[in-house]
Image (tube, rainbow, N blue to C red):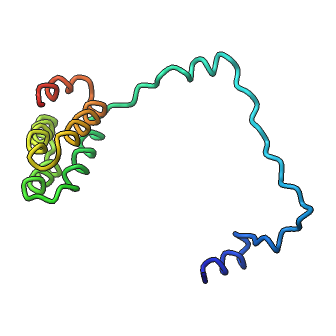
Amino acid sequence: AAMVIQMIQGGYLVTAADVPASTPPAPVAMPAPLAPSVTAASAAPVERRRSLVAARIYVLGILEMQRHPNAAALFRDLQQARAEGEVLRVMQSALQVLPALTSEGYCQRVRQRLMEALPVEHCSAFAAIA
């Protein structure tokens, strides 16, 4: 309650008593419609950027949420991995261990999101893990 009072005093909030009843709401400016060529181009699906760094961060987040010693060990290994091959190896190990730690549905969603983040050239190495 004290924070709300401070926000009112600072001018960030307005109470109903402060606004006259006869004041109409401020009109909202509508943006001009886009040209047809722009809307047609924006309607096409946009390919997400793929990167090994994004995939690594995603797997680190998944491993961090698991409360299991194996997940913690893989988290440390992935955090310390520097070479591309080593990062890929640890991420593959994580995908192989994950079914023992969580449900199969969750593992499928993790695999799907990982395949969306991985660069295309690395997807074949992960496609065989099921």
Viewer-proximal residue, 63 or 15? Answer: 15
Quadrant assignment for the C terminus:
top left
Residue at x-position 27% and y-position 46%: 57
Residue at x-position 12% and y-position 37%: 92
Residue at x-position 14% and y-position 46%: 81
Viewer-proximal residue, 90 or 22? Answer: 22
In which image quadrant can residue 25 be found? Answer: bottom right
Residue occupying the far right of the picture:
22
Viewer-proximal residue, 80 or 57? Answer: 57
Above or below, 56 against 11 in this view is above
Above or below, 21 against 109 in this view is below
Query: Is residue 118 rendered to the left or right of residue 18?
Result: left
Quadrant assignment for the N terminus:
bottom right
Which x, y percent locates residue 96?
9, 39
In which image quadrant can residue 33 be found? Answer: top right
Query: Is residue 23 rendered to the left or right of residue 110?
Result: right
Which x, y percent locates residue 112?
26, 33
Marks counted in the figure total 0
Which x, y percent locates residue 27?
83, 48
Which x, y percent locates residue 43?
55, 22
